[in-house]
Image (tube, helix red, strand yellow):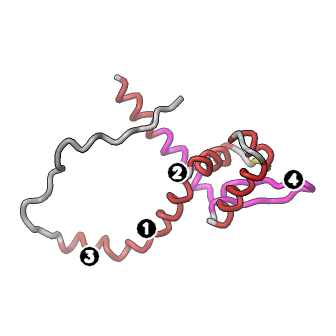
Amino acid sequence: MARTPTPEPLEHDVPVCQVDCVNAEMVNRIKPHLDQVSNIVFMFKALADDTRAKIVYALSEAELCVCDVAAVIGSSKATASYHLRLLHHMGLAKYRKHGKLVYYRLANPHIQGFIRETLDSMSSTEKRDTK
């Protein structure tokens, strides 16, 4: 099972600039784009919940019906449905109905890439830390 990274204890202060020296060109280039961050924050808030993160991972692997999602995360259909509904309202998941079944998938293929890259990065970090 993957290890959850724990933050290092704050044993001492982190270094801070000892003089004021603002790179105005760099600041002016970056600052206009900060409004885009709210979209990122929205996605991270959705993924900050353990159950929703597991669901997003599962949906990154395959389109699943609500019953399958419930089985994967070990919950009731009502719990799975609640989280899937939230992910849908947040714009992270889409669904389609097929008879009496409802199938969910990720709304954007970039989310799948993000999940895989994050997991790969964490796996690489863990391998380096254990050497």
Please say if the residues under marks 2 and 3 sit with CB atoms less than 8 Å apart. no
Q: Is residue 102 magenta?
A: yes
Residue 112, how many percent across, how many down?
59, 50
CA gap between label 2 and label 4 equals 28 Å
Determine the image quadrant of residue 33.
bottom left
Instruction: Give left or right: position of 26 versus 49.
Output: left
Helix, strand or loop under label 2: helix
Above or below for 89 versus 125: below
Residue at mark 4: 101
CA gap between label 2 and label 1 equals 16 Å
Residue 5, how many percent across, how many down?
41, 38
Residue at mark 2: 114
Between tags 2 and 4, which lies in front? 4
Which of 71/32 is in front?
71
Q: Which sits earlier in the primary sequence, circle 2 or circle 4?
A: 4
Q: What is the three-letter code of the residue carrying label 2?
A: Phe
Above or below for 100 versus 33: above
Q: What is the three-letter code of the residue carrying label 1?
A: Val
CA gap between label 4 and label 1 equals 36 Å
Helix, strand or loop under label 4: strand
Q: Determine which of the numbered discs, if any, sits on residue 37 in the image.
A: 1
Q: What is the three-letter code of the residue carrying label 4?
A: Leu
Q: Determine which of the numbered discs, if any, sits on residue 28 in the image.
A: 3
Q: Which sits earlier in the primary sequence, circle 3 or circle 4?
A: 3
CA gap between label 2 and label 3 equals 28 Å
* Residues shaded magenta: 92-120
Q: What is the three-letter code of the residue carrying label 3?
A: Asn
Helix, strand or loop under label 3: helix
